[in-house]
Image (cartoon, grey):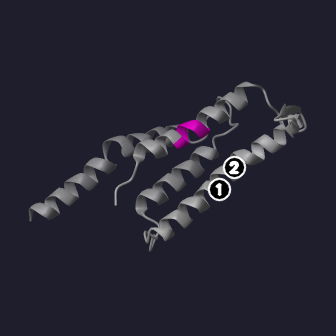
Amino acid sequence: MRTDWNLIRAMMNAAIDACERIEASGCKETDRDAMIEVGGRPVSVHDLLVSAWTYPENIRYRIIRDRHARGADLPYVPESARILIAMAQASAELVGTGDATPAGTDIRRMIGWFEDHLPTGVEAAVAARRKA
């Protein structure tokens, strides 16, 4: 089964772009009770932020239900999914760290490994196996 990597990229970019704009706005913990009106109802910053993590959680469950309905349940968590989860968790630890990037050298080394070694290593191993 194929993966729509462009859709995944768009989802991740949407979250990253929104988080970047929220941070650039100067929003702080003390701003959680700031209100705006949406559709004639008061909505707080806290409401918006909670929605920003519950919306994807709800979409995740919708995806799981739709996969099940199509008979496409996952018998295990695919390696690519584990990579995305681990990278997202590591990335999340960088939020709010300022200019002093913890583990910066190791992060850049890891990015290089992902760009230069992981795909080519897997591609070479699979090609060699299929050739044999």
Q: Which residue is mark 2?
A: 53
- Expressed as whole percent of the image width and height from the top left, the position of residue 43 reads 85, 39
Give me the residue at 80% from left, 31% from top. 27
- Expressed as whole percent of the image width and height from the top left, the position of residue 100 reads 64, 32
- Expressed as whole percent of the image width and height from the top left, the position of residue 101 reads 61, 35
State how far apart marks 2 and 1 are (Cα).
Answer: 6 Å
Give me the residue at 48% from left, 65% from top. 67
Position of the N terminus by quadrant = bottom left
- Placement of 40 over or under 54, stated as above or below: above
- Placement of 81 over or under 108, stated as above or below: below
Q: Which residues are magenta?
A: 11-15
- Placement of 124 over or under 28, stated as above or below: below
Give me the residue at 34% from left, 56% from top. 2
Position of the C terminus by quadrant = bottom left
- Placement of 74 over or under 80, stated as above or below: below
Q: Secondary structure at mark 2?
A: helix
Query: In the image, 65: left or right of 97?
Result: left
Query: In the image, 39: left or right of 33?
Result: left
Amino acid of disc 2: Trp
- Expressed as whole percent of the image width and height from the top left, the position of residue 71 reads 43, 72
Q: Residue furthest top?
A: 25
Q: In this orientation, which residue lies closer to the viewer: 124 or 49?
A: 49
Q: Which residue is mark 1?
A: 57
Q: In this orientation, which residue lies closer to the viewer: 29 or 32?
A: 32
User: Could you tell me if residue 100 is visible in this image?
Assistant: no
Using the rendered view, name the quadrant where residue 19 is placed. Answer: top right
Q: In this orientation, which residue lies closer to the viewer: 21 or 98?
A: 21
Q: Residue furthest bottom?
A: 75
Q: Are marks 2 and 1 in contact (CB under 8 Å)?
A: yes
